[in-house]
Amino acid sequence: MGFIRRQLLKVIEWKDNSNDTIVYRYPMTDRDEIMNGCQLVVNEGQMAILSKEGQFAETFGPGTHKLETKNLPILTAIASWKYGFDSPFKADVYYINTKQFINQTWGTSNPVMMRDNDFGMIRVRAFGKYTFQVNDAATLIKAVVGTNGIYTVHDLKDHLKTMFVTSFSDALATSKISALDIATKYEELSDALKEALQPSFNEMGLLVVKAYVENVSLPEEVEQAIDKRTSLGILSDKMGTYVAMETAQAMRDAANNPSGSGLAGAGVGLGAGVGMAGMMMNNLQNVKDEPVQKNDDKITCPFCQAQIDKDSKFCNVCGKQLPTDNFCSECGSKIAAGSNFCSNCGKKVN
């Protein structure tokens, strides 16, 4: 006969059996033509675009659409059909998945730099998940898909991960979250990440629905420093409780002893408890803060390590007599050399 028989398409429909197809171009051969009056079926979660000679024409949402040249004004203008055309015609049909692509993962393959007020420049790693969907199908096809017959999430994933790493660095800088607080600020950091990503996604016709930061890993030495600071804070709180308990117990013992001698014993116990607490608190303070400057007007009690005036005869923290051979251990009066008894209270000199 000398001619090639045309294949007339009466129904065009794409049933997506995959979970990651973003754009699908309906397969057509050189002989395939769309029959005038053909039914274009667009399922829920899809949209379809007709393209003619590289130009996008009509866009269709979910439903069944009857394709007639008289009802396709943009396509008619592109094809220069001045008075319409009732014969079969050629056009490309692109199906676009408009559903949300959830549980997409991202992570930093290499550490990214972070400037912290406490630790300076440190390297951190992070990972999380995100959800995206097509926002502008025409832009996506022009900027990303091109003439590919099918385009999936897998084809786009590496590029999106690169965008996430770059935007995560920007989000860290703009949020100004310290390394000490970063574990409690994941939601705030996630919002900053989403905001940093959206302009780049817009250029591809995509929308960032959700962006999650699930974990930020700090260098081991920084984690150790944070653990130490946390432990010191807990110990400081425990010391305050310990001192309060010792004070209450000493007062209770003194009140229960009618002779009054218990008061002195309780005072000694209280002094010892307070002295121990003071010693431990001083040690903690020395670890947490800058080293304490030495004071020549103070001496250290050999029993509780408290700082007292250098002219003191007794420790005003633990109550014990400071070692000396020149003062009475009972009343503190000065004893002449060679004396066997105190000239003030009569106590025998040991």
Image (spheres, rainbow, N blue to C red):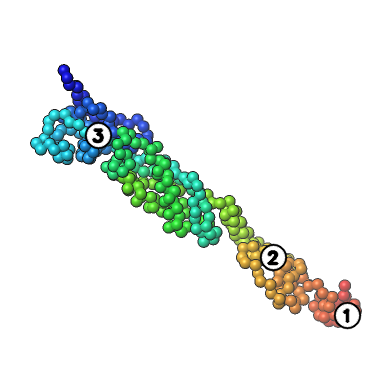
- Quick check: 285 above or below 90? below
Q: Amino acid at mark 1?
A: Ala
Q: Percent from the top left, x then y, of residue 251?
A: 68, 67
- Identify the image quadrant of the C terminus: bottom right
> Along the horizontal axis of the image, is 183 left or right of 312?
left
- Identify the image quadrant of the N terminus: top left
Q: Residues within 10 Å of mark 2 (few under 14, many from 20)?
A: some
Query: Can you identify the residue that label 3 sits on?
Result: 93
Q: Which mark is residue 299?
A: none
User: Which marked residue is nearer to the observer: mark 3 or mark 2?
Assistant: 3
The secondary element bearing badge 2 is classed as: helix
Q: Residue at x 38, y 38 (%)?
A: 155
For the question of whether residue 224 can be seen, the reply is yes
How far apart, in angstroms, are the residues tagged by discs 1 and 3?
115 Å
Q: Which mark is residue 337?
A: 1
Residue found at the very far front of the displayed protein: 2
- Quick check: 239 above or below 320? above
Q: Amino acid at mark 3?
A: Val
How far apart, in angstroms, are the residues tagged by discs 3 and 2?
82 Å
The foreground one among 282 and 289 is: 289
The secondary element bearing badge 3 is classed as: strand
Query: Can you identify the residue that label 2 sits on?
Result: 279
How far apart, in angstroms, are the residues tagged by discs 1 and 2?
34 Å
